[in-house]
Amino acid sequence: MPQVPEYIKTLVPYPPGKPIEELEREYGVKNPIKLASNENALGPSPKAVEAVRAILPILHRYPDGSGYYLKQKLSEKLGVTPQHLVLGNGSNDLIDFLIRTYVRPGVQVISSEPSFLVYRKMVQVAGGENVVVPLRDMRHDLDAITHAVTSKTAIIFMDNPNNPTATVINRADFDSFLKRLPEDVLVVLDGAYEEFVRDTECPLGYEYALKDSRVVGLRTFSKAYGLAGLRVGYGVMDPEVASMLDRVRQPFNVNAAALAAAEAALDDQEHLEKTLQLTWDGLDFLSQELEKLGCATMPGHTNFMLVDTGRDAREVYEAMLRKGVIVRAMASYGFPHHIRITIGLPEENERFLNAFSEVMK
């Protein structure tokens, strides 16, 4: 067998959330609910479902490798040109493109701790050097990130809002941060949850990408648009950067069903607005009720919230599983007492609260 580099051998596989089917098998729980993977509680747009049905008879044909029609719709919605856009098999694909394009052994990439685990994993796959900056007060520490930049730095990844804390960067602070950065460093604002943000002072990646060639804004259809199972995302960036990423992008990297569903989802503003309102109402409700139980929560700018249980989060997680509710224990993110809860339907939020109250007693 060929030799495997040490930086590949030491990789730890990404830990996915426990699927509902596995919980039913292991614990014999009937009708469990999953509030662990930040999925859309309402599901996909009916228009997206219909678009997938319509594409089924022609699945023997390759998809449009350029994603022409989806790019046209995104261009109209965001006020960008198609040349600013790169499509991916989820926004993870864009993270992979960026790292494969700009990172090699000896090159540094800065990310925060904790943040989305995939950044560091993909940098390690490329043989690059991860430079990890701890959050400060649960937020990206822009001053510390600035001081961590060296002549070897190629990319800075910041999930905004952050996963798992659900906090956001302030626009004025981000403007100041950009002024202090070298011209040859890319700043990737991963906006997987941007649609849920209610803070008007939060910088949006796609807006900054239009005025600063160093900024790349990432977005996904997995969260607010409810298409996690189809895997489709996109990046907005300077056309020169987009041209480089298209060189490493696999042909037909976004499948035909995903393209059709994403196009239809963009046309269903009503479904998006229902999703956002349901999420915001759920965040407000759970924050109030959890506060009554004596649990601190972070102000939510996403479709999930981080909750300090004051106890071993793994024990809480296991106890919740036995009550048929899947949440996420955050010990692997450096929060041994916290769980992360995805906002569900109103009845799911109530069921979570009932189970959580019993567990905490």
Image (cartoon, helix red, strand yellow):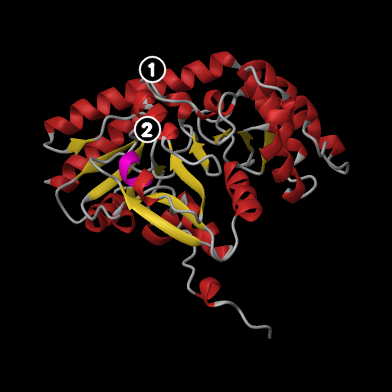
Pointer 2 local density, CA inside 10 Å: few below 14, some 14–19, many at least 20:
many
Tell me which numbered mark, 1 or 2, is placed earlier along the sequence: 1
From where the camera sits, is residue 361 visible?
Answer: yes
Q: What's the magenta region?
A: 141-145
Question: Residue 247, position in %: x, y?
Answer: 76, 47
Q: What type is the residue that disc 1 sits on?
A: Thr
State whether residue 321 is above or below residue 59. below
- Hey, which residue is sitting farthest top in the picture? 270
Q: Residue at x 66, y 21 (%)?
A: 80
Q: What is the secondary structure assignment of the residue under circle 1?
A: loop
Q: Would you identify the image quadrant in which residue 18 lies?
A: bottom left
Q: Residue at x 63, y 35 (%)?
A: 234
From the viewer's perspective, is 141 left or right of 63? left
Q: Which residue is mark 1?
A: 200
From the viewer's perspective, is 163 left or right of 218? left
Q: Residue at x 26, y 29 (%)?
A: 286
